[in-house]
Amino acid sequence: MERNLQKIKTQLDNPDTLSKDEVIVAANAIAAAANTGLGALYAPSRDKGEGWRKTRLKSAFFEKPEEAKKVALQFNLEANEFAKVAATGDVGQIKAKFGKLTQSCKSCHDSFREKDAK
C-alpha cells in the first residue's frame, strides 16, 4: 500500500513529468488491496505478535470492532473512488481525491497502529 501511495505522491509532486498511466496502475493496486478486506489479516491476539518484526497493531482494533469496521469501510470507499478519479486523468481531481484517500489511511493508523519507534 505504502509503495503505491508513494508512487502516486511522487507523480503528483512532479506534474511536468507526471505519468497518468503510473497513477492509474498504482490507484488500481490500492483499490484491489482495499477490496481484499485488510482487517481480516488481523486475527485475535495479533496485537501481541512478534512475527518477522513486532506488530504495531493496537489492541483497540479488537476492543472497538465497530470503529475499526467504520474506518475500514471508509478506506475501501476512498480507495475505489480514487481509482475511478485516477482513470479520468484529471490532475486537479486526482490531487483532491488523493488527499481524501491519504486522510482515510491516517485515520486508521491514528486509531489502530502504534507509531514507528525512531
Image (cartoon, helix red, strand yellow):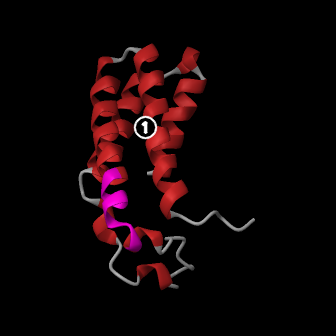
Locate residue 83 relative to residue 117 in the image: left or right. Answer: left
Placement of 59 over or under 45, stated as above or below: above
Locate residue 85 relative to residue 103 in the image: left or right. Answer: left
Residue 98: where, in percent of width, then height? 45, 31
Name the residue located 32 percent from the left edge and 70 percent from the top edge. Answer: 41
- On the image, numbered disc 1 is attached to which residue? 101
Whether residue 14 is visible, yes or no, is yes
Q: 74 or 9: which is nearer to us?
A: 74
Q: Most prominent secondary structure in the magenta stretch?
A: helix
Placement of 57 over or under 103, stated as above or below: below
How crowded pointer 1 is (Cα within 10 Å; few <14, some 14-19, many 20+) is rated as: many
Locate residue 39 relative to residue 99 in the image: left or right. Answer: left
**In the image, residue 69 lies in the stretch drawn in magenta:** yes
Residue 5: where, in percent of width, then height? 48, 42
Name the residue located 47 percent from the left edge and 75 percent from the top edge. Answer: 59
Amino acid type of the residue tagged 1 in the rendering: Leu
**In the image, residue 39 lies in the stretch drawn in magenta:** no
Q: In the figure, residue 94 lies in which quadrant?
A: top left
Q: 67 or 53: which is nearer to us?
A: 67
Residue 29: where, in percent of width, then height? 33, 45
Q: What are the residue bounds of the magenta stretch?
A: 63-70
Is label 1 in a helix, a strand or a loop? helix
